[in-house]
Amino acid sequence: MPNGTVFREITSSMACLLVSGTILTHCDHQSAGETQDANMSFEQQRIQMVASQIERRGVRHARVLAAMRSVPRHEFVEASYRDSAYDDTPLPIGHRQTISQPYIAAYMTELLQPQPGDRILEVGTGSGYQAAVLAEIGAEVYTIEIVEPLCARARADLQRLGYQNITVICGDGYNGWPAAAPYDGILVAAAPEKVPQPLLDQLKVGGRLVIPVGGFSQDLIVIERTESGYTRTNQIPVRFVPMTGQAEE
């Protein structure tokens, strides 16, 4: 997930820093950047991560929690950051991009409400971690990345890890991927000024789009397609980098 401007949101229970849609929460759990116990296995670190960073903040969907416990996040970060793979923070993946904080990956997945067998489009592959979480739930995932070196690396890593239900596409995701439409869900990891109409058009009736929208001020929103149109619900303020490519025109 790309880097962006930091701003502060204060709620009744926590003070949070939001970075590119990634909530870095300074509360009574593990602080961002604090490394896990080096004596713990990666599997043990994942279990602790889900309990302290995700369940504790309110994510409850059983399939999402199971996927977060299963997907090896350390396989999607550079070797120099593997000791921090399960920390409560995004991590650099090169090209001024980051792998998203575990909580935001889980939260956006829960908002999407994917089911086994669903066809899901992701715009902004990054490291491939979010696509792996969706695939672990049993979805058929199509994921698009505009930064070609990241696209190639994510494709290689996902193939190496045995994910056969993910198709990685190198290109501009503004127009979605009509070849596999319609989708049960679409998840976007960069902020356009307004929701791209092609993404709305590619949703099934009953399908959901989870996307950050705005300029300097952004909101993470959920749009659901209905028989008569669309419903829109604002979730939380976020800070993502702008969607590039055709969205800039």
Image (cartoon, rainbow, N blue to C red):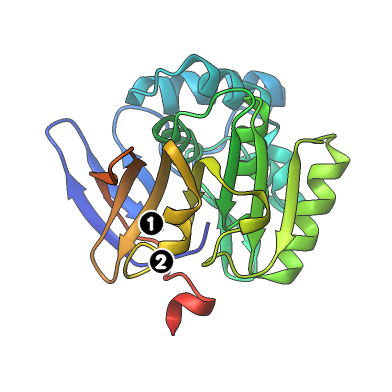
Is residue 45 shown above or below 82?
A: above
The answer, for residue 243, to whether it is visible in the render is: yes
Label 1 secondary element: strand
Tags 1 and 2 touching, CB below 8 Å:
yes
Image point (58%, 31%), residue name:
36
**Image quadrant where residue 66 sits:** top right
**Residue 176 versus residue 130: which sits nearer the camera?**
176
* First-in-chain label (1 vs 2): 2
The circle on residue 19 is 1
On the picture, is 60 further left or further right than 128?
left
Is residue 224 shown above or below 192?
A: above
Q: Amino acid at mark 2?
A: Gly
Q: Amino acid at mark 1?
A: Val
On the picture, is 160 further left or further right than 66?
right
What residue is pinned by disc 2? 4
On the picture, is 47 further left or further right than 208?
right
Q: Position of residue 35 (x, y in %)?
A: 56, 37
Q: Residue furthest front?
A: 228
**Image quadrant where residue 55 sits:** top left
Q: Position of residue 78 (x, y in %)?
A: 73, 53
Q: Position of residue 112 (x, y in %)?
A: 44, 35
Label 2 secondary element: loop
**Image quadrant where residue 103 sits:** top left
Q: Position of residue 190 (x, y in %)?
A: 46, 62
The answer, for residue 39, to whether it is visible in the render is: no
* Mark 1 nearby-residue class (10 Å; few <14, some 14–19, many ≥20): many
Image point (49%, 14%), residue name:
62
Q: CA distance from mark 1 to mark 2?
A: 6 Å
